[in-house]
C-alpha cells in the first residue's frame, strides 16, 4: 500500500487525495501514516469512517481473509473499491463478492493484479495477439522465490492458512491472472500437489522461538530478521515470526496442472526457497515456442520489489524446425515498483477514464478460483472443477470434453 500512497501523493495528486486511513491495528496504522508521510483522520471502525468521511474510493490492503468483508461493505455503500490481490481466499468468499456485485452492478470495482502489467507480460501479450507462434497449445510457468523474498512470507501472517489460505492464493493468484490475461481464457479444472519442506517445525533447523525480536537465540540464529519498526509500530503484530514455528500450515512448494476453457493445458509450479528469484514462462504454439524469462536482483536484502531491483529480462521464440532462437526486445513504459508494473497499473487505475483493460473484480474471482481449486486438490488428492455457479456469476461457462 506504500506504493499506492506514493502514487496518489505525487503523480495523481491533481485528481486524488488520501482522505482517511482505517485499520483495526491502530499502532500499525500510525506507523504506516508516518512512513508514507500522510496526515489524515485515522479510524479503527470501517462504518464510522465511511459515515464521517464519505469516501469516493476504498483501497483494500488488509490481510487476505478480510478483503471480502470490506469489498462487500464498500459495494453495498455504492463506494468504488480497489482490492489488493488476492481478491479473497476461497469459493465461499467468491460467491459473496459476486452476489454483492450483482446487487451493485454500477459500482466501479477492480483488483490490483499488477503482474499482468510487468513489461515482459505486456510484451508477450502483444506478441501473442500478433500471432507470432500461432494458436497456443500448452504452457509451463515456473515461479521461484529466493531465500530472502520467499522466507518473508513465512515470517508474516501469510504462513497461517486461516489468514491467507496459502501461497496458492496470496502469491500465485497474480500468476493465474497473468495466465488468464495471456491466454485470453480461464481455468476450469485443476489438479495439484504440494508440501511444506523448507519452513515450519519439521524442516531442519537449530533454533526456534516466537518472534525474532524477543527470541533468546537472536544473537546466534542465522535466520534472525530485523523488521522496520517505524512501519510496523504495533503492540499486536510484528512481521518477524519464527520461520520454524509449528503453527505454519501452508505449502512452500506446489505444482498444478490447469486446464483452460479454450483447451490450453498449463503446468504451473512455485518454489518458495530457491537460490534465485524469478519466473520462466514457456508458451508452445502451433509454429514455435515463446520463452519469457524474468529474474530480479537487488542490492537490498529486504525488498526485491523495490525500485532498486534490477530485472534480467528476455523473450525468445524457438521456431519449429529451427535451432536458432529469435530474441525480442522487452517494451518498458515507466520505472517503479514491481519491475515497472505499478507505474502502468496506476496509470490505468487512476486515469480520468480508466480503460477496460484493467483487471476487473471478475478477473480477481477467476484468479482466486484457480488458487482455491489448487488448495482443495492438494487436500483431497483429487481433480477439482471450478464451480459452475462461480463461473456463471463471473460471466463465464465451462467447456466440457466428451469424457466428462
Image (cartoon, rainbow, N blue to C red):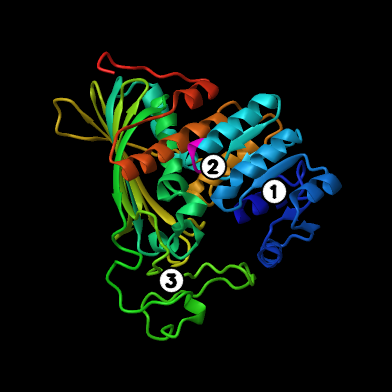
Residue position for label 2: 88
Identify the image quadrant of residue 304. Answer: bottom left
Residue 119 visible to the viewer: yes
Q: CA distance from mark 3 to mark 1?
A: 35 Å
The residue shown at (66%, 37%) is 72
Give the x, y percent position of residue 354. Answer: 65, 30
Per the rendered image, the range of residues in magenta is 86-91
Query: Observer-nearest residue: 267 or 383?
Result: 383
Left or right relative to 13: residue 199: left
Residue position for label 3: 242
Whether the residues at callouts 3 and 1 have beta carbons within 8 Å, the answer is no
Q: CA distance from mark 1 to mark 2?
A: 24 Å
Q: Residue furthest front?
A: 380
Give the x, y percent position of residue 42. Answer: 77, 58
The residue shown at (42%, 50%) is 167
Residue position for label 1: 8
Amino acid at each position: 500500500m506504500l506504493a499506492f500512497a506514493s502514487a496518489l501523493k505525487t503523480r495523481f495528486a491533481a485528481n486524488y487525495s488520501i482522505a482517511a486511513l482505517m485499520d483495526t491495528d491502530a499502532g500499525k496504522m500510525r506507523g504506516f501514516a508516518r512512513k508514507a508521510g500522510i496526515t489524515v483522520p485515522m479510524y479503527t471502525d470501517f462504518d464510522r469512517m465511511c459515515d464521517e468521511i464519505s469516501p469516493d474510493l476504498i483501497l483494500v490492503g488488509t490481510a487476505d481473509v478480510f478483503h471480502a468483508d470490506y469489498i462487500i461493505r464498500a459495494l453495498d455503500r455504492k463506494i468504488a473499491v480497489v482490492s489488493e490481490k488476492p481478491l479473497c481466499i476461497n469459493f465461499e468468499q467468491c460467491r459473496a463478492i459476486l452476489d454483492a456485485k450483482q446487487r451493485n452492478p454500477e459500482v466501479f470495482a477492480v483488483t490490483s493484479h499488477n503482474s499482468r502489467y510487468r513489461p515482459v507480460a505486456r510484451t508477450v501479450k502483444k506478441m501473442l495477439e500478433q500471432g507470432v507462434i500461432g494458436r497456443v497449445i500448452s504452457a509451463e510457468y515456473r515461479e521461484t522465490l529466493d531465500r530472502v523474498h520467499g522466507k518473508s512470507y513465512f515470517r508474516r501472517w501469510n504462513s497461517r492458512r486461516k489468514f491467507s489460505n496459502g501461497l496458492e492464493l496470496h502469491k500465485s493468484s497474480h500468476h493465474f491472472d497473468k495466465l488468464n490475461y495471456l491466454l485470453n481464457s480461464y481455468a476450469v479444472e485443476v489438479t495439484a500437489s504440494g508440501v511444506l519442506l523448507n519452513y515450519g517445525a519439521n524442516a531442519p533447523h537449530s533454533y526456534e522461538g516466537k518472534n525474532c525480536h524477543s527470541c533468546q537465540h537472536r544473537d546466534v540464529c542465522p535466520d534472525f530478521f530485523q523488521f522496520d519498526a517505524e512501519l510496523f509500530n504495533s503492540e499486536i503484530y510484528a512481521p518477524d515470526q519464527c520461520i520454524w514455528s509449528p503453527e505454519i500450515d501452508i505449502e512452500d512448494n506446489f505444482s498444478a496442472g490447469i486446464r483452460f476453457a479454450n483447451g490450453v493445458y498449463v503446468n504451473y509450479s512455485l518454489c518458495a526457497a530457491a537460490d534465485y528469484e524469478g519466473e520462466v514462462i514457456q508458451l508452445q504454439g502451433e509454429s514455435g515456442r515463446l520463452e519469457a524469462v524474468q529474474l530480479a536482483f537487488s542490492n537490498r536484502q529486504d525488498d526485491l520489489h523495490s525500485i532498486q531491483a534490477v530485472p534480467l529480462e528476455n523473450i525468445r521464440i524457438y521456431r519449429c524446425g529451427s535451432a536458432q532462437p529469435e530474441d525480442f526486445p522487452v517494451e518498458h513504459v515507466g520505472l517503479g515498483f514491481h519491475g515497472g508494473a505499478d507505474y502502468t497499473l496506476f496509470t490505468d487505475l487512476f486515469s480520468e477514464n480508466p480503460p477496460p483493460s484493467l483487471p476487473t473484480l471478475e478477473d480477481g474471482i477467476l484468479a482466486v478460483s484457480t488458487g482455491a481449486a489448487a488448495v482443495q486438490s492438494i487436500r483431497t488428492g483429487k481433480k477439482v472443477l471450478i464451480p459452475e455457479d462461480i463461473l456463471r456469476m463471473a460471466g463465464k461457462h465451462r467447456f466440457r470434453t466428451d469424457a466428462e
